[in-house]
Image (cartoon, rainbow, N blue to C red):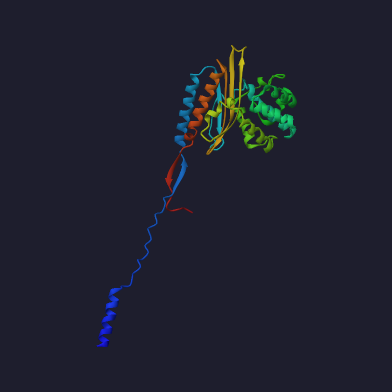
Amino acid sequence: MWTAWLGLALVAGCGAEPVPVKPAAVRAPVKAARCFLKYPDVRAGHAARARLERDIAHYVGDRPGRIVYAAVDLVSGVSLGQGRHDGDLITASGAKVDILAALLQRRDGRLDEHERDLASRMITESDNSAADALWSRVGGGAAMGDFYRRIGLRETTPGPSSYWGGTKTSPADRIRLMKVLVKGGKGLSSADRALLLGLMEQVRREQAWGVSAAARPGDRVALKNGWTPRPFVQNTWAVTSYGRVVGPGRDLLLAVQTDRQPGEGTGIQTIEGIARLIGSRLDSLIPTISRPCPTKPTF
């Protein structure tokens, strides 16, 4: 009897508390990401470029005076232009960057404190008295002619005598100058270039119009503008702007020159209209298409 009772107790105990069973771990299936490669869409890029050039030409055709421009994106290599080699338009205050670049090259970057102050006022405030002083220190028109030959600006002629504002240049030469400031060479050290570009980024707000209209939010802009009445040319104005607009995916060098403008404001409006067209549509000139990666790689 004791054995029977013990057996019943064991059976009852086992039935009351079943051994818990751990669920087996189940891994979710891994979904492999699809591979895509991007290729330049050459045909779409050519079509976008043609549309942009047509739209700029139409815009320029409706504006008064003479208008020329050049643009190069150092990231994509895209370039645009109309009258880019016309070298008979005056720069006015646009020549002030040239003056400082020539002085830095001549002095191997060694400027005294007073000259650095003059340089800052000449670029950021477009101070004409500072430009007069530094034009004299660099050696005037003859020395500037030598500088242009050394630096490779073949379409730029210094103003006569002390008239630095009469310097004539082309959009292509403004782009060449900016390339030197960005990439280096031609006797300008990295410190010289940093000084010049830094001052061009600090131009007073009221003078920062022009090619800056090509900038997107967050882009950095370095520029120099020129503007002057021309009473002996039918009482018109010459207005110019050139510089660099740099940000994610682009490093745009842009120069727009105008002449025979009815007023300064008209010239500014024309320059900004061209800059805005180029800046807003630059990405469309380098479109890409995506294609799946090949499943069987070749060796």
Of the pair 216 and 169, the residue shown nearer to us: 216
Residue 6 x, y percent position in the rendering: 28, 84
At a point 70% along the width and 27% down the height, the residue shown is 118
Residue closer to the observer: 177 or 196: 196
Q: Position of residue 291 (x, y in %)?
A: 42, 45
| Side of 34 relative to 64 (left or right) | left
Up-down: is 234 above or below 196?
above
Q: Answer left or right for 73 relative to 123.
A: left
Q: Is residue 155 visible?
A: no
Q: Quadrant of residue 44?
A: top left
Instruction: Examine the rendered structure and indicate whether residue 80 appears above or below residue 32.
Output: above
Provide residue 115's location: percent of width, then percent of height: 73, 29
| 166 vs 125, nearest the viewer | 125
The residue lying toward the viewer, choosing from 1 and 174, is 1
Numbered disc total: 0
Image quarter where the N terminus lies is: bottom left
What's the residue at 46%, 25% (across, down)? 55
Q: Determine if residue 116 is in view.
A: yes
Quadrant of the rendered image containing residue 265: top right
Q: Position of residue 284 (x, y in %)?
A: 47, 34
Q: Residue at x 45, y 46 (%)?
A: 37
